[in-house]
Amino acid sequence: MKLRKPSGVVFLVGLIAISVAQQTPRGGHTPKPSWPPSWVSTKWTYDDTEFRKVREKLEQMKWHTDVPNLETIGSWVDKYLPPVEKKVKANRFKDVKPLEAYWAMALWAYFPTECQKHAPWVTDLVRFVPAPPSYEYVRVAACVAIKQDEDNGLEPLMIRLLSKWSKDPLVRWRYIDLKGFDGYIPSIHDRMARFADELYKELPLRNEILSVTGVAVYAGHWIRSKKQESFNHLMFYFDEAIKNSQISKPEQDRYRMLKKDYIERGRKAGMKVPGG
């Protein structure tokens, strides 16, 4: 299975306007979905040992390797997703075992570009498969739901997840998807900006992703706040994206053009801009 290198632009577009089409399960009777599902408020009493082993593999690959090994990710996708997909498309949701569902959802939450063709039915796992009362399971289910724009009622859960592990990279990354681009509420958008800054500092091996996250977050933050500090952060993340060797030249050129546009906007808004 040949996989292309993850695209920073794809990620940026995904952050700014998540528009993945929702689909219902195929074949036979379609169960009636309910939202939010019961796992949003369930108590976590499940033994997470098996789930945690999977999470540790994915965390290492996503955040702590120089360049994620696309062959390894592809082998995981080919091994763990098709058997689950077969059950989902036959509406055999009760036959999907918790560990099977976890692998599928976790792979999509961590590596959405590599799992792109599986996106519609992975959402079905979130909506229809009975979930164990598990912190690890709910964590990835919430991140998949957010990425699929099923955000209604999830913010209290995201806060609850971060109260258990405040430094969780995945949850903070997806929390930005949930709240970073809605209308302007200063306290919420300041928190999303802080998450972007924290992730960039804590995960230097993923700066090709997180510099783009910073651009997306601070572009919206500055447009709404018109603060010099926010503008300075935006310029910083533009520069980091432009110089990052893991971002392709066409993408770097796009960020150069966007930076020029925002410099002009900043000048008109009375900001101190690069070059005076």
Image: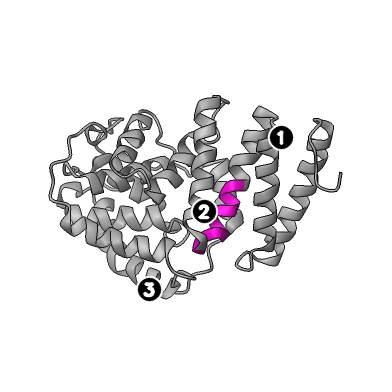
Please state which of the two labelled residues, at mark 3 or mark 1, is closer to the viewer: 1
Image location of residue 172, percent across then percent down: 42, 44
Other-residue count near label 1 (Cα within 10 Å), few / some / many at <14 / 14–19 / ≥20: some
State which quadrant residue 218 falls in.
Answer: top right
**What distance separates the C-alpha of mark 3 from that of mark 1?**
43 Å
Q: Earlier in the sequence, mark 2 or mark 1?
A: 2
Q: Which residue is mark 1?
A: 228
Q: Which residue is mark 3?
A: 72
Magenta highlight range:
205-214
Q: Which mark is residue 69?
A: none
Image location of residue 96, percent across then percent down: 19, 53
Please state which of the two labelled residues, at mark 3 or mark 2, is closer to the viewer: 2
Q: Residue at x 54, y 32 (%)?
A: 189
Q: Nearer the viewer, residue 191 or 176?
A: 191
Q: Is residue 128 left or right of residue 197?
A: left
Q: Secondary structure at mark 1?
A: helix
Image location of residue 59, percent across then percent down: 36, 60
Please state which amino acid type lies under the numbered disc 3.
Answer: Thr
Question: Where, quadrant-wise, is the C terminus in this rendering?
Answer: top right
Q: Which residue is mark 2?
A: 201
Q: Earlier in the sequence, mark 3 or mark 2?
A: 3
